[in-house]
Image (tube, grey):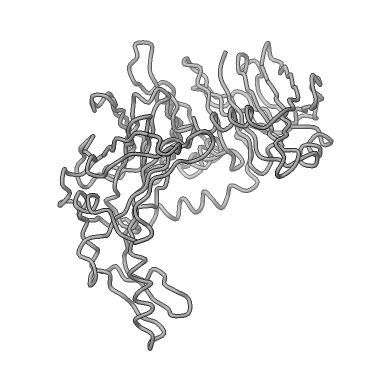
Amino acid sequence: MKRYSVRWIFVTVLTGIVLLGAAGYACASLLKDAGEFTYRQRGQAGDAHAADGLKITKQYYVRTSVTSSEYWISEGEFRYQNGELLVSTKRISGLLSEQEEEMKDYLNSGTTGPRFYISVEIYPLLEELLRTYDNERTVAVNLSEYYEYYPLSWSIRIPQDGYYLTKEYDRENRKSDEALQKRFPIPVLENETYLLNRLQGFTEGNGDFYSTTDYNDLQSVGNDSEIFFFVKNRSAFGNPVDMSNLKDGYGIYRIPYRITKKNGEKEIVADADEISLFYPLPEDVNVISLALTADAGTLFLRTEENERVILTVIDVKTAEKLASFDLGDADWCILQSGNLRTDYMVAYGDGFLHVIGRDAKGQWADRLQIPVVGALNTEYKRAMNAWKLLHPDDASVRYAYDGEGKLAIVSCSDNHPEQLSVTILTKDGVQFTDVMGLSVSDSVSLFTEGYYSGNMYTAEWE
């Protein structure tokens, strides 16, 4: 239960937090207006030369109307050179198709790759029982009285040309996939109860319960021919689930797939019979999440073992373990992988931010350790500072590691898409912070000239 309370504390204190190291804001300075929009630096602290060589690109995507095929985009390019920020902007107008496709392709190449989902399909039973107990208002149902093993079903979702192509089990007849059931016979927890209410439907009861979908997109990751996934060995309350009956043993699995055309429509071809064990694990190891490198050739496996978080790097072709890293106490470890398909992993553990990446010889190593020490030298304070760096202002984050000794963290809040925040770190801590955004008039223009649909941005060292 301790872990849940810590995460709750993290979430509740995010509001109002700014980037570490910004001790004060300088007076807003007007940047050169080189296009349709004008940007202002709203605050800066530290040595600006630390950002030299960092390039950020950002686009605002706006429709002229809800149904129109017309669009306009404000595109900004930001470069730090010789201690100064150089800005160029331009406005693009035209038909929707090409630019929209480019934007969606970019988004799809990041956090939304192929995914394989497994779910427990017990709801048809509960709905049927609601109709059966028509003389009683509330009934507690012990699931083990109806199932020996969890009825499992599966689906695949793959981004294609700006939309998601899906393959699902037979929802119409509400049947579970028999091949999946045979491969993963997981006994129902004895004290898993559900409370049925004739007026309000059903809710989980007071007993322990098992769900396979808590991890969502972190539970699987794929390339253009196969998807890697894991099946949880813990209940929602962290209690062990019996995995001893699994056909091939416990670990990381993979399912091959291909995309074909039928009657002019694309469809996914995949079969649960083709699922195989990719990387075996002891049954008591708790898998946290998976991620792939940009070339989809290396798999990051993040597990919890003996209350420590372990990052294992695995070759996709050979299933060989290339390296492993102890990232610290599981109750305090914060894991972040940028866009999930990056060539390095950023994590916090035991008072340090770690950048795990390839060295000059191509070997995986702990390339950079950044101390995270707050005003109070306590584990809680360090963890809070790490959270602020990895999730600044509750924003989406881009990482840029220069391969030598600097890490740039660039964020853009969904609530304030007109603003960018930059933090530069080395082994000695925060070296520079910067906050920039549109002028007030241009911020108004962004949201009033059309229908704001989102933004995208990248960060890299030149």
Look at 34% across and 61% down and name the residue there.
Answer: 174
| Nearer-the-camera pick, 202 or 260 | 260
Q: Is residue 353 left or right of residue 145?
A: right
Q: Quadrant of the N terminus?
A: bottom left
Quarter occupied by residue 43: top right
Q: Position of residue 216 (x, y in %)?
A: 42, 47
Q: Position of residue 92 (x, y in %)?
A: 73, 25
Residue that lies at the very extreme toward the right in this rendered image = 441
Q: Is residue 364 left or right of residue 183?
A: right
Relative to 214, residue 40 above or below? above
Q: Position of residue 67 (x, y in %)?
A: 70, 43
Q: Is residue 288 left or right of residue 11?
A: left
Residue that lies at the very extreme toward the front in this rendered image = 263
Q: Position of residue 430 (x, y in %)?
A: 57, 27
Quarter occupied by residue 308: top left
Q: Is residue 347 left or right of residue 396?
A: left
Labels in figure, total: 0
Look at 67% across and 29% down and name the residue there.
Answer: 59
Q: Quadrant of the C terminus?
A: top right
Residue that lies at the very extreme toward the bottom in this rendered image = 135
